[in-house]
Amino acid sequence: MPQATLLQAIHDALLEGMARDPRVILLGEDVGREGGVFRMTQGLMRRFGQERVIDTPLNEGGIIGMAIGMALNGMRPVVEIEFADFIYPAFDQIVSELAKMRYRSAGQFTAPVVVRTPSGGGIKGGHYHSQSPEAYFVHTSGLTVVMPSTPADAKGLLASAMGGEDPVIFLEPKALYRTVRGEVPEGEHRVPIGEARIARSGDDLTLVAWGAMAPVAEKAAGLAAAEGVSVEVIDPRTLWPLDIGTIVGSVNRTGRAVILHEAPRSCGFGAEVAALIQERCFLHLKAPVYRVAGFDTPFPYALEKSYLPDPRRVLAAVRAAMAF
Amino acid sequence: MNVARTEALDLHRKMGLIRRFEERAEEAYGQGKIGGFLHLYIGEEAIAVGAMAALKPDDDVVTHYRDHGYVLARGIDPGLVMAELYGKATGISKGKGGSMHMAAVDRHLWGGYAIVGGHIPLAVGLALANQYRNLPRVVTCFFGEGATNIGTFYSGLNMAAVWKVPLLAIVENNRYGMGTAVERASAVSDIYKKAACLNIPSVQIDGNDVLAVRDAVREMADKARAGGGPRLIEAKTYRFRGHSMGDPQRYRTKDEVEEAKARDPILLWRNFLLGNRIAEEADLRKISDGIEAEIETAVRFAENSPPPDPSELCANVLVAE
């Protein structure tokens, strides 16, 4: 199987999705001639034309609002928001309109829009180019929220998002765009929405992590193994609808859970996962469910490395859970 | 005279139907049968009716939240609309939308939207899809003058103009955004002038003259349909009732409202019909009687319909549920 970076895998999913379905349209700021701020869409305008790869005005709310209208009217828009931090001007369109179309019309219509956006830190971007907004969107019923961490999952989940009927917020861990490589199936490849991936099997503790934190979790699991602790790493891949069954199955076996994410700790998605675990695994738990997360601060520039969880911080939580 | 008798009487019937529908809704609201908010269109009926008379049945329509008039003007059964207001399972959206969110996809009615101006980019997207799919459909987007002060008005219409999509924006200038008069909220109170900054041709019309609305909409929609890019109509009108039920209306005098009622669009059209001998009093009475019966049936349908089953609560959140 050929190797690809996360970036190439997403590019391929876009290209193949467009080739398969003429209803698929890409739109965003500089996605056409410029090929996108991360060059994700390079070459697609040349291949598919200006009608299908649309350079939009600088207007996030307008882009997503327009994509909703296009989706209602039989098209499959895939929007790029240059950075997840720029999604807030479009927050109203996502929360008030996109998420509610199906419910408010009692199923008369739905808006199958895919909103792709690079998320998370790791590139010294400071507070407007580094945030992890997943909890806002999970909190908004009517949205599917996806965040892959491997090239194969990125390709397969984006293909599923583009082929599905529901609106999807597709968060791309930009720190991993060119830093992870992996085997990616050629041609049509789908990973089902709503199924977690067990990244590493283990018996003593369940570590849940997504996006750029998934490889951090795997490194931490390696460190723990050196101390004789067997850690199971679960990457939910789809944050909503969450595959809670896989997580519960694992925690009922290991009796311990640590949740890891980049976003600030308070009211982060980890809080929801922890709540679900304690509701469903209470009698199996041997230790409190711990969270390792970003700090409750705006995203820092110079102190980014201190802000982002690293394997040693995760290991400290693993040790605490084991010693409880 | 550029209106045939059948059409003239139909315009009259539709405006009267909306008026009586809303008067009955007002009663039901007072009796606690309709929940939440109720924004009445009374005084503005000529705009919905004139516009729908000009548009083709498969032209797409997106509206603001004062939206009962549009669905009725497009010929949706008033019973379905009343049942939606009552929150009944038989409503146009099974009681999941309510007053401000009337939608009927089979009639190309894409809904009323209650985040002011939020639907303008949606309308642009619907129009872009029509353009892409080579469908000869115009999208008409209705909003109030208050919506022209929010960013989506400019950002949405800018995109419409850049891509020359078949969009007709109709601004219903009823003078008040809730309780704030247009002069107090907008640096430009002749709203049609705002389109100039986006190179969008626009016109200001008397929104209480149903024929003027029909003719302007037909002309502007045809131009947008022919690939000429978006158009904007400012239809000047006046809201006879409060912003919503229970509005104390301290922002205007009773005299001002009474004066405006002299230009009631239904009264104007009635005078036109009688004055030009298009109809006699007896014809109009017959129409009124028909409306009464239709509304009565609608109310009875809403009253007798069951509420939604609790199992509906979690249905239609996601397709893949």
Image (spheres, helix red, strand yellow):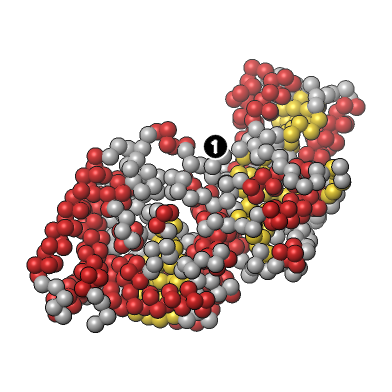
Tell me the quadrant of the picture where the N terminus of chain B can be found. bottom left
B101 relative to B4, above or below: above
Q: Nearer the viewer, residue A220 or B96?
A: B96
Determine the image quadrant of residue A36.
bottom right
| Residue A12 in picture, x, y percent from top left | 77, 53
Q: Identify which residue is drawn at 27% across, 49% down.
A: B79
Q: Identify which residue is drawn at 70% across, 48% down.
A: A158
The answer to whether residue A74 is visible is yes
Disc 1 residue crowd, few under 14, some 14–19, many 20+, Cα 10 Å: few
Label 1, on which residue? Answer: B321
B181 relative to A192, above or below: below
Determine the image quadrant of residue A235.
top right
Q: Nearer the viewer, residue A211 or B165?
A: B165
Q: Secondary structure at mark 1?
A: loop
Instruction: Residue lying at the far left in this picture: please name it.
Output: B282
Q: Is residue A74 left or right of residue B111?
A: right
| Residue B151 in picture, x, y percent from top left | 52, 68
> Mark 1, chain letter?
B
Amino acid under disc 1 = Glu
Q: Nearer the viewer, residue B127 or B156?
A: B127
| Residue A80 in picture, x, y percent from top left | 67, 58
| Residue A297 in picture, x, y percent from top left | 69, 49
Q: Identify which residue is drawn at 24% across, 56% down.
A: B21
The answer to whether residue B240 is visible is no
